[in-house]
Image (spheres, rainbow, N blue to C red):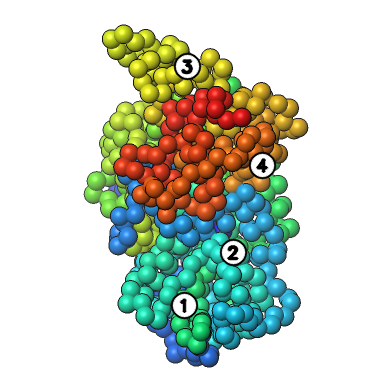
Amino acid sequence: MKKRILSMLLTGCLLFALVPSAGAGWVVDRNGYEHWVETPESESIGSCSRPARKPRQQPKDGITVSEVETDEAQQIVVSGEGESYLQDILKDGEFVRWIDRVALPDYAVKVYDTMAGADGAASLLIQDDYGTLSAEPVAAHFNADVESVSVLSGSLSEAFAQDGAFLSAEQFSSSSFDQIPASESDRSIDYNSLKPGDVVRTPAYNAIYATSVQKDGNTNYEKERKDACHYVSTAFQAFDRDHPEIFWLSGKLKLRQVTVTIRTNGVSSKVGFIFLVLIDKDGFQMRSPNYTSQAAIEEGIRQRDAAVQAILDTVPISSDRRASVTAFNRWLTEHNEYNTSADLYSLPNEPHEALCALVGSSGTSGPVCDGYARALKVLCDQRSIPCVLVDGYARSSMEHKGEFHMWNSVQADDNNWYGVDVTWNDPSVKGGAGPKSGRENENFLFVGEETVVGGLAFSASHPPVNRAADGGISFINNPALSKTAYSGVAAEPAAQPAAAGYNNVAGYGDVVEGDWFGKAVAFVSERKLMDGISASSFQPKGNMTRAMLVTALYRLAGSPEAGGASSFHDVPTGSELSRAVAWANANGIIEGYTKATFGTNDQVTREQLAAVFYRYASHTGCDMSATADLNVYTDAGSVRSYAADAIRWAIGSGLMNGTEGGGISPAGTATRAQVASMLMNFSENVK
């Protein structure tokens, strides 16, 4: 569920002055803020800001029905300040996807996977089955493990504000929850059979089940329950940032906790079950008010796809990354006007979404910063250009404390990352209203940390925070920017001197015969299974992406007829990758996140790698009997269930080995050298 895929709703936007020129003076803008202006054409820059937090509603007196209690956390408006008490779940290193940046429990990742899975966005987020409540009556559920399960339905005394945002970590304590009566829908659920990621549909609410926490006899119950809510919220936030192509959700988060008494052998025990709510009878709805039906969503998707294709048609597919992003920036700035609403705090959801900027909008319908940033990522994804959303506090001077803002980091052809701020490239201009004001620019296009624009280095004017909620995780392990602006020249790494007695492999300066992966790189290079990053660099320690992996397996299979082209929006049409993805998807080797998104540039984890090779081997009729005992590895318990058989087979077949320290590192990112080695071992040893 993410609204853009869960569009996180940044709730308001402010304008503040850029750099003064001549004849300046202080004026008060429409939001009551003072700004230094000089001439009628003085520029302003858009920055998304969230208003001060509303007082948290205190728990109401509730009714406990039988042996079941239900808590529902309500959403609040957040300022984006504060750091999570769980900040240490942030992984070491730099990661492109937000979900990869945090070490979440499997159940929280499963909630993410349910929202962004192979058909998650197509069914869970679009179809009316999940966006409307069931009309069918339900009966109480009984089984041998649960004796008269009484569960609770949720209702709040106040409707959610239109500009709601993510939950604050402070909300996850039990005192912040509202206790409400149980419903027949709660009693209808077979709690013993629930698995993380399951979707329950009832006349009272539809929700994704996350996890359960033992209550009776558990001295750590309160912390474990609070942590669980925090983990689910974090997964929800990551989902929102990773999928800007979803524009029809409201960005609101609602958790439902149901405490159920289970009796086993005459012994009663209370267990808390935690759900992420999609919709309920009390008025909560994940969908934006303009997209509360499947027909409206599908029409919006048609508009999105047509708009994206029209923009892409203006940019030759042969264009390099710099030229492509420059063209995207030009189109977005010349066809949009920063939102002119007098009250930017009360905007509906649409200006915050990619669709708003992709179709070109102006006046009180114009996009705000996250609309611009999300649109750029959608376009970059279509051309397989690595691009991420960045949240932070942008400011025009060191004296200005800054306002909440969203922009992008983009990876150029030299493999370095650079800052891009489409919003600041499209300044509001007094006396020049409309999409094309004549002040559109490229000042914040492929800039580095130390690039100075308007008197401030980019790192000073755009400090990233990457935190969606008060007390939330700060996802600050994003790719680091280059120190300097992009030079326009793809840097070729200098060839490493060959070690004594060895030669460079396949002309790559970063691979010599003495390297453990040297033979494998020679193998994949000779058979053209993998290409180098450049003519002189294989980048063996570089991360393997989904696009690289599916292309390598497609070539290993002999580049068979795909039976059609890929339908994923982030896979270039008419390309080898399009044929490879279509072939792999048709044969169940690797699926997309949704029917529209493949995740082309996302990194591949070791357990994902094993699963894909496992499916490929099964598809090609290989012997699948090899196995291994995972219990000998220190982190065997962290292997997710879907990948367990695949990793046993991969290790048993000699394709995969343990890592340093005696582990498997299932969530570790696979390197290009490791994949080259697996391709060679598979070709030589798996029959």
| Pointer 3 residue | 522
Residue in the picture at 50% in, 78% down: 258
**Cα separation between marks 4 and 2:** 22 Å
State whether residue 433 is above or below residue 673.
below
Give the mark toward the camera: 2 or 1: 1
| Pointer 1 residue | 271
Count residues near mark 1 (Cα–Cα under 10 Å), then give few for <14, some for 14-19, many for 20+: many
Residue contact between numbered discs 2 and 3, judged by CB atoms under 8 Å: no
Count residues near mark 3 (Cα–Cα under 10 Å), then give few for <14, some for 14-19, many for 20+: many
Residue in the picture at 45% in, 24% down: 413
Q: Secondary structure at mark 2?
A: loop
Count residues near mark 2 (Cα–Cα under 10 Å), then give few for <14, some for 14-19, many for 20+: some
Left or right of 552, for residue 390: left
**Cα separation between marks 4 and 3:** 29 Å
- Quadrant the C terminus occupies: top right
**Cα separation between marks 4 and 1:** 38 Å
Under mark 2, the amino acid is Asp
Can you give x and y, in whole percent of width and height, for residue 525 in the image? Answer: 51, 17
Tell me which numbered mark, 2 or 1, is placed earlier along the sequence. 2
Under mark 3, the amino acid is Ala
Can you give x and y, in whole percent of width and height, for residue 491 in the image? Answer: 39, 19
